[in-house]
């Protein structure tokens, strides 16, 4: 979905996502927080994909990358709300495997 239906969504953060954002190394959490609010007011246009990985808690959620942070969010179309549920470092083996489908040589 894009176009006129993909704008003016209200964006909110789950407490656990904010707490995790504060622990990520070598990022500017305030910049990521503020950028997410602006970017995800157009959640479909800024989505890099929908999570669909074996045994992943956030399957069916959209995700995007802001700086070196993967932001995982759910869209409530009926109320035009985006809810950010999780963040991950984009510099880890988990991110390579789950979000980018790349092989992590550290798994051997």
Image (cartoon, helix red, strand yellow):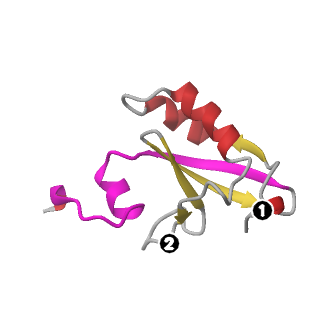
- The residue beneath circle 1 is 3
Give the answer, above or below, for where 77 lies relative to 16.
below
Disc 2 vs disc 1: Cβ atoms closer than 8 Å?
A: no
Is 66 located above or below residue 51 in the figure? above
Residue nearest the observer in this picture, 15 or 75? 75
Which residue is found at the position 48% from the left and 26% from the top?
28
Q: Residue furthest front?
A: 3
Task: Give the residue at mark 2.
Answer: 52
Label located before the other in sequence (2 or 1):
1
Question: Does any portion of residue 14 appear in the rendered image?
Answer: no
Q: Residue at x 61, y 50 (%)?
A: 85
- Real-space Cα separation, disc 2 to disc 1, in angstroms: 25 Å
Q: Is residue 51 left or right of residue 103?
A: right
Q: Residues within 10 Å of mark 1 (few under 14, many from 20)?
A: few
Quarter the C terminus occupies: bottom left
Q: Position of residue 54 (x, y in %)?
A: 42, 74
């Amino acid at each position: 979905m894009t176009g006129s239906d993909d704008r003016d969504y209200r964006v909110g953060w789950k407490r656990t996502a904010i707490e995790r954002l504060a622990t990520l190394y070598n990022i500017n959490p305030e910049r990521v927080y503020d950028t997410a609010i602006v970017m995800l007011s157009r959640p479909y246009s800024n989505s890099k994909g929908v999570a669909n990985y074996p045994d992943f808690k956030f399957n069916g959620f959209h995700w995007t990358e802001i700086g070196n942070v993967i932001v995982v969010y759910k869209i409530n179309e009926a109320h035009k709300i985006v809810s950010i549920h999780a963040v991950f470092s984009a510099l880890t083996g988990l991110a390579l495997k789950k979000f980018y489908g790349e092989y992590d040589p550290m798994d051997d």
